[in-house]
Image: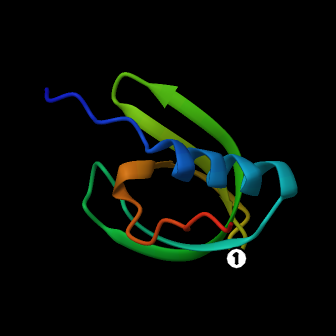
Amino acid sequence: MTPIASTPRQIAERLQIAILTAEHMRLHWEDESTGTHYMEVVMPLEWQESPEGDYLLCKVLAENLEVRVRVDLVQNLPTPVK
């Protein structure tokens, strides 16, 4: 298995701020096991690091469902606001 590059620091910080402030985000991501694409309004809950990659645990607001999204599969990562 090829190691996944770690998330750039500025993106990780931006997502961690979203977690701390309970920010709602519209994210577009690809499911790592099925390849299915999703675009949902989510509330980020937790940042998780693992050897397989960085993950964002989110709550899909429309369905009240928690999902674990691999960060490098998010198609529209939020940009830092300076």
Q: Give the answer, above or below, for where 38 lies relative to 12.
A: below
Task: Write the residue at 26% across / 56% down.
Answer: 34
Residue 60, image x, y percentages:
66, 65
Quadrant of the rendered image containing residue 4: top left
Location of residue 81 with respect to 56 vertically, above or below = below
Extreme-right residue of the structure: 21
Q: Which residue is mark 1?
A: 62
Q: Quadrant of residue 36?
A: bottom left
Q: How many residues crowd around disc 1 within 10 Å: few (fewer than 14), some, or many (20 or more)?
A: few
| Colour pattern | rainbow
The percent coordinates of residue 18 (x first, y second) are 74, 57
Between residues 63 and 82, which one lies in front from this camera angle? 82
Q: Which of the two residues, 53 or 30, is positioned nearer the viewer here?
A: 53
In the image, farthest residue toward the front? 82
Whole-percent x, y for residue 31 in the image = 35, 57
Q: Amino acid at mark 1?
A: Ala
Q: Residue extending furthest top? A: 51
User: Which residue is more in the foreground, 80 or 63?
Assistant: 80
- Which residue is at a point 61% across and 63% down the rendered structure image? 80
Left/right of residue 31 with respect to residue 43 in the rendered view: left
Quarter of the picture containing the C terminus is bottom right
Picture quarter with the N terminus = top left
Secondary element at tag 1: loop
Q: Which quadrant of the structure image shows residue 29?
A: bottom left
Q: Residue at x 44, y 50 (%)?
A: 71
Instruction: Pinpoint residue 43: horizontal percent, then vertical percent.
Output: 73, 62
Q: How many marks?
A: 1
- Looking at the image, residue 4 sits to the left or right of residue 56; the answer is left
Please say if 39 is above or below 67. Answer: below
